[in-house]
Every structure is written in C-alpha cells, then in structure tokens.
Image: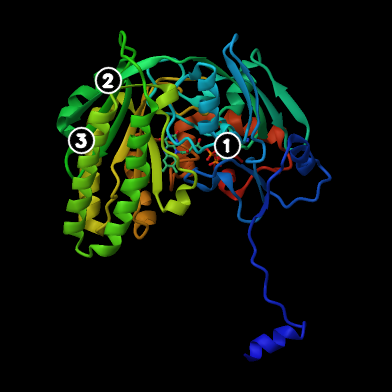
C-alpha cells in the first residue's frame, strides 16, 4: 500500500522490463531504413522468421529482433520457368497452396509449414526427400535479395554460386534475406509405404535405405523398441494424392499427441503407468493414422505440421545429424543411452524421436551433410522439467558418435565441437562474416560462440 503511494508521487518508478526490442517492418523500405548505418537501433540485430529454431540463433536478449512476418508477398510464380519469387516472411504453407493453384510444388517435402521462406533458407530445412538431388529447402534457391548489415541491398544471382552457397544456411549472420527465387516443379505423386520394425531389424536395413533414393522418415520409440518407417518412392502410377488424409495425420501428430501427453503428464502421477499409456497412444497413432491413412501423396499434399509457435505449445526439441554409414550402430546406442539416462535421472522424452535421411548436399557452405549422407534425428518432448539437463547428456552422446550439430537446432552443442566438425568451412564462413559485418551488427552473443 505504502509502496503504491510512493510510486504515485512520481519520484519512484517501477523498473521497465529489459529485453530485446521487436521491430516488424511492413515493407522492404522499412527494413532498409532499420539497417541504415545512422538508424537508431539497439544492437545486435537478429532477423526472426517464425521463431521455431531450437536455439537462441533467432533472437538476442539485448538488441533488436527484426521479425520478417510483414514481408509476406509472393512476388511472382513463373509457371513456364518453374520458379517462384517470394519475400522472406511468406510462410511455407501459404507458398505451397499458391504453387498448387498453378499445378506446381516445392522440390522436397518439408514438415513444419509455419516456418518462413527466410528461416527455411537461413537455417537447414529438410524433410523426407526422395532422390539425391538437393535435400534442403535452400538447395533450390537460385537468387536472393539481401539487406546487408550496413543497410545496402545486395542481389545474388544464379551464376554467383559461391555467394549463394555462403548465404544459404547463414543464420542471418551475413545479412537479412528479404526476397528469394526458388526452383519448383510440376506436382508429382509418390507412394508412401509404412513398416513397423524393431530397432535391431531397423539397424540391419538402415544402411541400404540411407544409400538408396528413397524418401525416409521414421519415428523411433526407444522404450518400446519400435521404429515406424515412412518410405516414399516415385512409383509407377501411384494414384491421386489427396490432402485430407495428410491433414488428419498432421493433426494427430502435431496437435492431438502433444496435448494429450501434456495432460497425462499432469494427471497421471505414477511415471511407469503414465509412460505405458503415452507409448501405447503413440503406437496406436502410428498404426492407425499413419500406416492406414496415407498411401500416396505429393509434396503439395503432404506438407504438414503447423507448428506456428512451438514454444507456446511447450514442445521442446533438439536435432543432431549422424553419418548414415554408422547409423546402424548409432540407433542401438541411442536406445541404450535413453535407457541409461532414464535409470540415472528419471527423465525421458514422451514424444517419439523423428529421423530423416539427408542426402549428401554441398550446396551450402554450412550444410550438415556436405561430405556424406546423414541421418537427422530430432528428439522431442513436452516434458519441460529435466529437459535442459537431458539435452546436455544428448549433446555428449551425439559428440561421441560423431554427430554434426546444427547451429539452429542442436541444443547444448559446444562451439569447439562445431569447429571440429565444420573445420575449414566454418573458418571460411567466419572470415566472410567479418568482412561483411566488421562492426558485428548482426552478431549476437549466441552466434559469436560459433561465428566470431
Ligand atoms: C517441434 C519442432 C520440430 C522441428 N523439426 C524440424 C525438422 O524436422 N526439420 C527441419 O528442417 N526443421 C525442423 N525444425 C526447425 C525449424 O522449423 C527450422 O529451423 C526452420 O527452418 C526455421 O524457420 P523459422 O521461420 O522459424 O526461422 P527462425 O527460427 O525464426 O530463424 C532461424 C534462423 O534463420 C535466421 N533467419 C530467419 N529469417 C531470416 C531472414 N529473412 N534472413 C536471414 N536470416 C534469417 C534467424 O536469425 C535464425 O538464425 C523443427 C522445429 C520445431 C519447433
């Protein structure tokens, strides 16, 4: 009461909460003005798309977060040359629908449709890619417009392959991508087949799957010793691809499961009972929704997972990439790691881990599969208590098995390990960053660990 009246005198003021300043430019001119050298703006500046990265790469505690959501125009769909030009804040789901109206689709299937074009270029964005031709969204970018750290506009064209390669997966450390032209193609259907196998069985076939041309996505349930495989191929006449079953599958996986698990975590106090229930529901979902519902699709129909704001849903994740050649051993070691961690800490993830085959792809300087095919393994959980310690153990496990960290997705990745993995490619990236941003306007403390 007394404190309230003191404040009313005007002599005492409540401390304003500190934190990043948020700016959402409504158009390109506003974006240029924000970055101009004499603009009054708190540093460092961090571009932010949908904000779905798992690490602090898309925000800064003290500087300015520039949200690209206002830059949401699809500039041109070229049905003749099969390209689309879109601003950075366009959501992938919007792009996919607009392309489908022209009979076109993205080359590659990308989950998490809430993410933005800019975020999908500036960070590794992958999904169950069929074939060995460009596994990342950014691999298909043929031109870009970038606002440089000093506010100048730079245009990068298809023939400037080295520059394109540096700006793909550049985590907003070299400049802010404001527009991109992306190669697309006419809609093509694929068949999707599903298998349920044990982890031992999976380990005997994963090598062949990873080295083939099959689109591979799998759901790994280490505590049930189960792997659910989603295998995609361009077969002869696979039939029509309808959107509705994929939407239903997506709803089951990305909305129903996390919500049900969060409720169970609250209302079922005995862990053994709770996890038995959770695993049974996961298995039932895989068996019913995934295996029975979707038998064929297209990249236009199958794009899924509307995680607009994963943080708000309380779904935590961390992704590491492992050499596909060793994954037959790694998957068994991962099962053991999960069991030992549960025994030692009482913590386990409630959602299945999700894996993808990444083909060898050197189109970006910081591509995680630059030298060889990899398997990206995303460990996810709605359980917040214990998660931070778990990801540290997971990072240790990943390092032991030659895991490649992704700056935007691998929680608790050590900078020294990133250096050992990316070696001279990271050195080159750092030198380039220093040249393009000598005043470190885009360098947050988080990014500085890796890119200073
Ligand atoms: C539950 C969950 C599961 C996930 N699973 C997958 C998965 O299976 N496969 C996958 O590929 N990804 C996955 N992700 C990761 C995430 O969706 C990708 O990293 C995505 O590409 C980020 O897009 P965004 O728009 O959210 O970008 P943000 O998270 O906002 O930003 C990512 C990075 O890009 C930079 N950036 C953003 N916009 C620009 C711009 N215009 N110019 C320059 N730099 C920019 C940011 O500064 C940051 O460094 C998952 C995320 C969640 C929440």
Is residue 421 shown above or below 62? above
Q: Secondary structure at mark 3?
A: helix
Is residue 30 found left or right of 373 in the rendered image? right
Mark 1 beta carbon near ligand 1 (under 8 Å) = yes
User: Disc 1 designates what residue?
Assistant: 171
Mark 2 beta carbon near ligand 1 (under 8 Å) = no
Q: Secondary structure at mark 2?
A: helix
| Residue 209 circle label | 2
Task: Residue 16: give x, y in percent of width and height.
Answer: 67, 69
Residue 150 visible at all:
no
Task: Residue 69: give x, y in percent of width and height.
Answer: 62, 41
Task: Residue 196: give x, y in percent of width and height.
Answer: 18, 31
- Please name which of the two marks, 3 or 1, marks the residue nearer to the observer: 3
Please name the residue shown 30% across and 8% down the image: 236
For the C terminus, which image quadrant?
A: top right
| Residue 100 circle label | none
């Amino acid at each position: 009461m007394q404190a309230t009246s003191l404040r009313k005198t005007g002599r005492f003021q409540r401390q304003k909460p500190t934190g990043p300043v948020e700016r959402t430019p409504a158009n390109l001119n506003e974006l240029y003005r924000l970055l101009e050298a004499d603009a009054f703006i708190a540093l460092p500046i961090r571009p932010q798309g949908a904000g779905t990265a798992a690490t602090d790469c898309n925000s800064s505690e003290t500087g300015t977060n520039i949200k690209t959501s206002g830059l949401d125009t699809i500039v041109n769909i070229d049905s003749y040359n099969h390209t689309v030009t879109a601003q950075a804040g366009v959501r992938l789901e919007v792009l996919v629908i607009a392309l489908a109206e022209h009979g076109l689709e993205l080359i590659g299937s990308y989950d998490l449709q809430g993410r933005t074009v800019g975020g999908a270029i500036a960070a590794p964005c992958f999904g169950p890619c069929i074939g060995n031709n460009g596994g990342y969204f950014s691999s298909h970018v043929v031109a870009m417009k970038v606002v440089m750290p000093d506010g100048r506009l730079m245009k990068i064209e298809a023939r400037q392959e080295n520059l394109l390669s540096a700006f793909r997966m550049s985590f907003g450390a070299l400049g802010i991508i404001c527009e991109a032209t992306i190669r697309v193609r006419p809609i093509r259907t694929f068949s999707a087949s599903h298998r349920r196998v044990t982890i031992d069985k999976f380990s005997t076939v994963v090598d062949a799957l990873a080295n083939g041309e099959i689109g591979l996505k799998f759901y790994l349930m280490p505590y049930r010793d189960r792997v659910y495989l989603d295998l995609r191929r361009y077969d002869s006449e696979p039939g029509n691809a309808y959107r509705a079953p994929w939407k239903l599958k997506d709803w089951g996986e990305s909305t129903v499961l996390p919500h049900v698990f969060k409720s169970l975590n609250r209302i079922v106090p005995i862990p053994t009972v709770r996890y038995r229930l959770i695993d049974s529901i996961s298995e039932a979902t895989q068996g019913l929704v995934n295996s029975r519902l979707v038998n064929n699709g297209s990249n236009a129909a199958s794009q899924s997972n509307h995680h607009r704001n994963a943080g708000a849903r309380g779904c935590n994740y961390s992704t590491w990439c492992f050499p596909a050649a060793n994954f037959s051993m790694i998957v068994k070691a991962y099962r053991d790691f999960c069991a030992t961690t549960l025994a030692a800490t009482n913590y386990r993830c409630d959602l299945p881990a999700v894996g993808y085959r990444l083909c060898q792809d050197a189109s970006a300087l910081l591509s995680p599969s630059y030298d060889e095919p990899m398997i990206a393994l995303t460990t996810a959980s709605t359980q917040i208590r214990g998660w931070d310690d778990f990801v540290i153990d997971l990072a240790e496990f990943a390092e032991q098995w030659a895991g490649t960290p992704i700056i935007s997705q691998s929680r608790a990745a050590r900078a020294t390990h990133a250096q050992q993995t990316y070696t001279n490619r990271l050195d080159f990236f750092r030198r380039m960053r220093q040249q393009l941003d000598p005043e470190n306007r885009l360098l947050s403390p988080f990014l500085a660990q890796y890119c200073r």
